Structures are given as C-alpha cells and as structure tokens.
Image: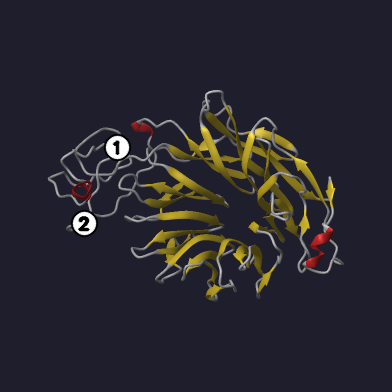
Amino acid sequence: MAVLCWAALSLFVSPSILYAEYNVTKISDDEKIARAPVISSSGLIAWYAFDITDTGNASSDIYIYENKTLKNLTESVFKIGTANIKPVVSQNTVVWEAALQSPAKADVTWIFREVPQETNALQELDAGYQIPDALSTRDAIYGITTFAPPVTNAADSNTTSATVGRNPSGNNEICMWEAGNEVKRLTRDTRNDFAPDVSSGLVAWQKAKGWPFGWEIMVLEGDFRNQLTTNYYYDMGPKSDGKHVVWYGWDGEDFEIYLYNQEDKSIVQITTNQYDDVAPVIHNGVIAWEGYSAVEGDIYMWTAAEGIRKLSINIEDDVNPRVWNGQVVWQGFDGDDFEIYHFNGEKTLKLTSNVFDDLQPDINDGVICWMGYHDNWDAEIFVLDQPGGAPQMISDNEYEDRGPRTAGGRIVWQSDQDGKSIIYLAEPQ
C-alpha cells in the first residue's frame, strides 16, 4: 500500500516539501514469531523466528528476504531445538548467535589467550576444576593454595584436573552465511560467544572468559583469528565497520571506548576519563557513544581529525546513538518525553517536538527512521527521508510497531499483533 504524509505532522516543518511514498509489504511467515529484523544497503533482510511447542520449548531459525524471496537459512543445518538468534547483516553476509552442541576436544578451534602471570598475580581455575567446600571462592581466585601454575590452553580443556584455569561458560557460538555459500560455524569451543557484528568481511564479537567472569573481544579477519583484548575485565559490545572495530571496556575504574585498526593492528583508547562511556557505534571512522559524566547520559562523537565532541544539548538523558556518514541520531528526554535528535555534521537539531515518546532511531543512506507513540497507546513507524523535511508515519494500526532499521532507502520493523510478531518492509515507490 502507498502511505502519504500524515497531515498532523505538519507541525514539524512546512508540508510543502515533497516526500517519497512507500509501499509496505508483510515479508515474514504468519505462523512464526519473528524478531529483530535488520537490513543491509544491498537489500538483504534478516531476522530470527520461532514457534512455541506444546511443551513450551522453542527453537529458532534465521530467515532472510532478498529479491522478494523468503528463505530459512538454518532449518536444514542444525538439529531441531537449536536457538539461532540476533542476526546482523552487511551487504550479502549474515552473522548470528547459535546455541550449539559442545564440540569434542579435538574439534576446539579457539585457543583462549590468558593474562600473563606475574608475582602475586591473580590466578585462574582450570575449566573443569571444582572448588572444594572448604576452600573459599576468594582463596581460589587469589591462589592461596598449592595448585599447579595456570595452563596456557584453557579453552582446550574438557577434563577435570587440579591445574589452574577458568570454568567453561557454555556453547553459544557464532555462525555466518555469505551469498552463494553454505552456513559456516565460526567458533567451536566451550566458552560463550555473543554480540557479533560484521562489515567488509571483518567479524567481531565478545567471548566469555568463564568463571570468575569477564569478556574479551575477538575478531575473524578472513581466515585469521585474533583475540584483541587479554585482561581480567569486561570488554563488550563490539561494532565493526570497514577496517575498524570499536567496543567499550572496563579499565579498572570505569568503562572507556577502544578502537582497533585492522590495517596496522593497533588498538587506541579513545576516551580517558572518570566516568562510564558505553554503547559505541562506528561508520567510516566516526564513532558515537553514550557518556555518563553525570547521572544522565550524553552523546559524544570522535573523529581522528577533531577528537571528541559532545553532541547532546539538553540536560536530560540522551541515549541510543546511531551514526552514518558523519551524522548521528539518538533519543533524548526533553523534560516531558523522549524526542529524536540529529547531528547533521555541523549542528544538533531536534527533529521531533510533540507530546509522546519517540524512540529507537536509526540512520543510513540518507534516511532516518524511529518508532513513536503518536496516540500514546501503541507505537508506529516514522521516516524522515528529506533534509529539512517533515516525518512521515508509514504504519497506522492498533499494534506495536517497533525496532525500525533502515538501509538503501528501505525500512524494516517488527509488528506485534495478537500473539504474533510480523516483519514489514517499506520501500519507496
């Protein structure tokens, strides 16, 4: 169906500007509960979907939609009951998390690099080691025992021993599909892998260290496996773009932003301050993130040429940034509700000004989209596709439309409808 600009939205900007009209199409299976759609600039769309069995168990598969064709990527690859979730896309590549069977010891492909031991340094427990009742957790961690030195191959440990290392954390693995190829399992070990991202063949994710906890950042560059971080802290939320990976990690005091450059294999600490910096995103070398210099969050941007710049202009919470081509969008609280803000490369603009919450913005290829509770009951999807223009509402129903993502001029989102969850695609006419 073609959707025109909603007349009431003329309060934003003059309605004399022309806009694209959109055809909105349902692209997911009605019989499945579909979640978390994503879209690439090439038009590849991916999401995960599942149905609940009579016993309450659920398995999920990764679906793609391309050239008006729906395909289940995983139903014939993994056994029934496997959870495949949270896909990300880049051009014609999909990467996701999958809960898979534990590999045999000989199949382990990731050897986890441990922190070098120093005098009186924190020691670790072997993957199979069980703490005796008489030994406190603190004593076990700090090595107040006569245990053997740490093993160097902690990931390749599937038998119980009294050596020092870490407990396994689980069998959540990273998988990838590229157009023209079969599904490929990228990790195979006993440590959980989460939060993958992909761009130009560079895949990044976070790997659990296992008890006593912590995360490291991993990358796969072609066939080269690289562990970017090695410490006792938490490194999380990697985002990949071109030759770069950005993430936030604990430095012993608070969370800071880090950047990896694939070309020279360097890692740079972008922020150095006394407060948390989290949720970074990156595009063409420009990084945006949330910084908590006070109780509320603010949006910051970094470029190699100009360094760090604060973008948010209000005194309330500013969160959920997205970046594209030197521009940043986010949601900010204006004292009454959340509105959408846009840094256009020169200055920060308030895109919405109304009496309802506007949330989850995204920006890509010149289009900005978000969800807004225009009737303060259920959310609809809004699009701004012209600089200086006014938003269009491209959904209009009694359901919850949320999680919009845009690329290549198209928009996808999830609509929760009477126990179902449907994926919709809006394409300009």
Query: Could you tell whether 294 is left or right of 147 in the image?
Result: right
- Count neighbours of disc 2 (C-alpha within 10 A) and say few if under 14, some if 14 to 19, many if 20 or more: few
Location of residue 309 with respect to 198 vertically, above or below: below
Q: Which residue is mark 2?
A: 121
Q: Measuring 37% from the left and 36% from the top, which residue is drawn there?
A: 108
Mark 2 secondary-structure assignment:
loop
Between 231 and 267, which is closer to the camera in this rendering? 231
Q: CA distance from mark 1 to mark 2?
A: 22 Å
Location of residue 306 with respect to 31 vertically, above or below: below
Between 397 and 31, which is closer to the camera in this rendering? 397
Amino acid at dot 2 = Ala
Between 281 and 7, which is closer to the camera in this rendering? 7
Between 227 and 62, which is closer to the camera in this rendering? 62
- Count neighbours of disc 1 (C-alpha within 10 A) and say few if under 14, some if 14 to 19, many if 20 or more: many
Q: Position of residue 220 (x, y in %)?
A: 47, 48
Mark 1 secondary-structure assignment:
loop
The answer to the question of whether label 1 and label 2 lie on touching residues, with beta carbons closer than 8 A, is no
Location of residue 38 with respect to 60 vertically, above or below: below
Q: Measuring 39% from the left and 51% from the top, which residue is drawn there?
A: 215
Split into 4 quadrants, where in the image is the N terminus? top right
Q: Which residue is mark 1?
A: 157
Can you tell which quarter of the image residue 61 is in? top right
Q: Measuring 34% from the left and 32% from the top, which residue is drawn there?
A: 105
Amino acid at dot 1 = Ser
Query: Could you tell whether 413 is left or right of 291 in the image?
Result: right
Q: Position of residue 51 (x, y in %)?
A: 60, 30
Q: Earlier in the sequence, mark 1 or mark 2?
A: 2
Name, please, the residue furthest toward the right: 16
Name, please, the residue furthest toward the left: 146
Q: Position of residue 76 (x, y in %)?
A: 58, 27
